[in-house]
Image (cartoon, helix red, strand yellow):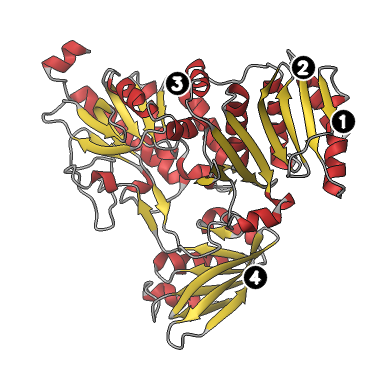
Amino acid sequence: MLDAAMQTQLKNYLANLREPIELVASLGDDAKSAQTRDLLNEIAALHEMVSASFDGDDDRKPSFVIRRASDPARWVRFAGLPMGHEFTSLVLALLWAGGHPPKVDPETLEQVRNLEGDFAFEMYFSLSCHNCPDVVQALTLMALENPRVTATLIEGGAYQAEVEQRGVLAVPATFLNGEPFWNGKMELAEILARLDTGASAKAAAKLSEKPPFEVLVIGGGPAGVAASIYTARKGFTTGIAAERFGGQLNDTLGIENLPGTAYTEGPKLAGELKGQVEANGIELINLAAAERLEPARQAGGLHSVHFAGGGTLKTRSLILATGARWRNLGVPGEAEYRNKGVAYCPHCDGPLFKGKRIAVIGGGNSGVEAAIDLAKIVGHVTLIEFDARLRADAVLQAKLQSMGNVDILTGAQTTEVLGENGRVSGLKWKDRTSGEEREIALEGVFVQIGLVPNTEWLKDSGLELSPHGEIVTDGEGRTNVPGVFAAGDATTVPYKQIVVAMGEGSKAALSAFDYLIRTEAPEDIAQAA
């Protein structure tokens, strides 16, 4: 099961074990069970503190438990083989069961240990899922640190009938005590916030106790991080409050258009941005969902941002970089095949579909522009528009119609994204005139029905928003409220791109710097500082 390089790597890791661990397998007579037996025997042979037995009686076969020999009540179960993206999860489970301390801050670890209640988690993953390891590792840590938490981590491909019976359409999919808990990526802190009913009150109190910032950035994507780096390097006390650090980067795989970087992936770039935030002494407050903005009552005064759960942060200058989210089709198969053929950014992902058949959904300017760009790269484009006619500018329509590898369907309602072997294989659509349903064989679907700015919480703040909900800014990132600036996809700036967001964030930061040095704080604020 493990090649020589993997065995050497694992042996080096297992040298960190502090106490014995047990691997207890429940096996059948199938090939997967034989592979599981081989894997566990190989692991046990690498260190004297690891033992493997095959007398388990769990109904899921093959599966195996990893547990501390001195405390069998703390265990995690893998059903199926945790290879591929999950090999790291397997290594961490072995280390944590063997007493090697996890790299988690003491406060979070104590919160895990003090959870009240019994929590039986079941989580489905796939070996090719890049979002699954975060959930697998969070649940593993919880189960090994708290005996009232159990985690059964199931490789969906090995338990297809179970997956279908439970209606799992996308991974990661997590169940708690037999009921759906969450679909999608979750970090440890997010899981704890959902379980620990007292955590939100504690977090709110802790938030409100923080002294005012000179610069507070709302949003942890490329625009927000760029802004925070600039102001921190100017010597201002800077904080970032983000609902999900990294934003859309967490859901983006290949990035090939970032100058100076030939290729990277969204989660990797988000990790690098986080490292840069820490290196510049910027205070990061993650999992903080802004709920209401209360602008300062006088020039130089403090703006207040109220968060879900009751906490409040105050700041002399505020940079809004809350980003946007792709407007979804909301049809079956869309979520399941996201990043597996369903894409939202033609600039980012188009080159990955070179020579292939794809569809673009949306007949506005963004959809037609995407179809034009993609037609130069892919083998064939089918543009699908719900309305009876395209809504894009006439010059764009003329250009599209002149291209020989493009078909245009109007009055067409997309009803389902189809897939095979974990990738998009086609699309169902309905003729809105005749009602007839048809299918198209495809390898990719680009959804271009617009972006939704994350600005709903600003509607009653006095901040000027466009008819589309975007924050209106001038050429220097200023809003209509003194001391409040904005950048990135949440604003009226055209071209929603990573590099554009970074530039706009830097611009907004420089404008905030100019504001702070030219605007004196009221006396009461100056004295408090």
Identify the residue under disc 4: 379
Label 3: which secondary element: loop
| Inter-mark Cα distance, 1 to 2 | 16 Å
Q: Quadrant of the N terminus?
A: top right
Are the residues flagged by discs 4 and 2 in contact, CB closer than 8 Å?
no
Residue at (51% x, 68% y) in the render: 360
294, 1: nearer the viewer: 1
Which residue position is annotated with label 2?
Answer: 20
Between 25 and 101, the one nearer to me in the picture:
25
Residue 2 location, quadrant:
top right
Instruction: In the rendered view, tell whether residue 285 sits above or below residue 35.
Output: above
How far apart marks 2 and 3 lie (CA) works out to 41 Å
Along the viewing direction, whichever of 297 and 374 lies nearer the viewer: 297
Q: Nearer the viewer, mark 4 or mark 2?
A: 2
Q: Is residue 354 above or below residue 314?
A: below
Disc 3 designates what residue?
280
Q: Earlier in the sequence, mark 3 or mark 4?
A: 3
Distance, label 4 to label 1, CA atoms, is: 46 Å
Q: What's under tag 3, amino acid-wise?
A: Asn
Q: Provide the secondary structure element on which disc 4 rests.
A: loop
Q: Secondary structure at mark 2?
A: loop
Looking at the image, tell me whether mark 2 or mark 3 is earlier in sequence order.
Answer: 2
Q: Residue at x 48, y 25 (%)?
A: 115
Q: Are marks 4 and 1 in contact (CB under 8 Å)?
A: no
Residue at point 25%, 29% (across, down): 317
Q: Are marks 3 and 1 in contact (CB under 8 Å)?
A: no
In the rendered image, residue 365, in percent from the top left (x then y), is placed at: 40, 67
Q: CA distance from mark 4 to mark 2?
A: 57 Å
Q: Residue 304: x and y, percent?
A: 22, 30
